[in-house]
């Protein structure tokens, strides 16, 4: 309990609100509106987390985050589906949201090799870096930049494409150094798990965190 309280005190947990506004009296709702509500509900359910972390003597679960302390590092992870721009990211990658806090007096380094994913058949999935994901998602930007009729222009991508790229860079977890007392958070990425998969295991610095699909 002391360890759990320490982690909870030092890690903030990001929640996603599902507030619903604009309710209408039933008699004035048209069939098309009802259909829209049903479809929206289906879409929301399809985007919710389907993998749930399992508590152990070493791991606490709070708000669907698994919390553990390893080598003076407070580590929280949740299986969260990417719902931001670029929307197609979820078609290619399995995503988790992590929060890492350095509780030591020394600078630490978190590298992709520190976080490994296993599926139910123990196939290994290595973490994919931000730059690698970016190359896949924004490959069309590379082509536009390379074959642009205006090679001297610096604003080769604008509007929605730029907004998607900025959103991705802001929400992704960036591997590297974490100063004493500081923390980093964001989404980490792996190759897409098979649709039939029912269990995944995230290994952080040798500690196994099991997620069960429901």
Image (spheres, rainbow, N blue to C red):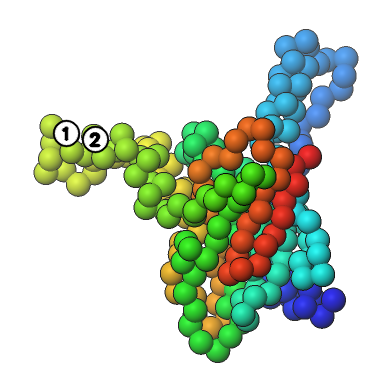
Q: Which residue is drawn at 42% across and 53% down?
A: 130
Secondary structure under the numbered disc 1 in the rendered image: loop
Name the image quarter holding the C terminus. top right
Q: Mark 1 points at which residue?
A: 147
Which quadrant does the N terminus fall into?
Answer: bottom right
On the image, the x and y values in percent for residue 17 come to 72, 47
Q: From the viewer's perspective, is residue 55 above or below residue 141? A: below
Real-space CA distance between mark 2 and mark 1, rounded to the nearest whole angstrom = 6 Å
Whether the residues at callouts 2 and 1 have beta carbons within 8 Å, the answer is yes
Q: Residue at x 60, y 65 (%)?
A: 204
Can you see residue 39? yes
Point out residue 47 in the picture as x, y percentages from the top left corner.
66, 36
On the image, numbered disc 2 is attached to which residue?
Answer: 143
Measuring from the top left, give residue 74's x and y in whole percent: 65, 73
**Residue shown at 16% from the left, 43% from the top:** 153
Q: In the figure, residue 77 lies in which quadrant? A: bottom right
As drawn, is 73 to the left or to the right of 113?
Answer: right
Image mark count = 2
- Going 48% across and 82% down the picture, which residue do you hit? 107
Element under disc 2: helix
In the drawing, does residue 153 fall left or right of residue 95?
left
């Amino acid at each position: 309990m002391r360890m759990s309280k320490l982690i909870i005190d030092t890690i903030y947990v990001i929640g996603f609100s599902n507030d619903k506004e604009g309710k209408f009296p039933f008699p004035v709702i048209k069939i098309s509106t009802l259909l829209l509500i049903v479809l929206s509900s289906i879409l929301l359910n399809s985007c919710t987390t389907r993998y749930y972390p399992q508590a152990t003597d070493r791991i606490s679960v709070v708000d669907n985050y698994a919390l553990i302390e390893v080598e003076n590092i407070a580590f929280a992870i949740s299986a969260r589906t990417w719902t931001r721009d670029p929307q197609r990211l979820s078609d290619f990658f399995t995503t988790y949201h992590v929060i890492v806090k350095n509780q030591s007096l020394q600078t630490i380094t978190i590298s992709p090799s520190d976080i490994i994913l296993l599926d139910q058949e123990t196939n290994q999935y290595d973490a994919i870096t931000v730059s690698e994901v970016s190359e896949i998602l924004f490959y069309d930007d590379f082509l536009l930049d390379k074959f642009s009729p205006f090679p001297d222009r610096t604003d080769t991508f604008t509007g929605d494409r730029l907004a998607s790229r900025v959103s991705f860079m802001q929400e992704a977890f960036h591997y590297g150094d974490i100063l004493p007392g500081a923390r980093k958070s964001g989404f980490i990425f792996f190759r897409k798990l098979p649709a039939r998969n029912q269990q995944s295991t995230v290994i952080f610095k040798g500690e196994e965190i099991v997620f069960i699909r429901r």
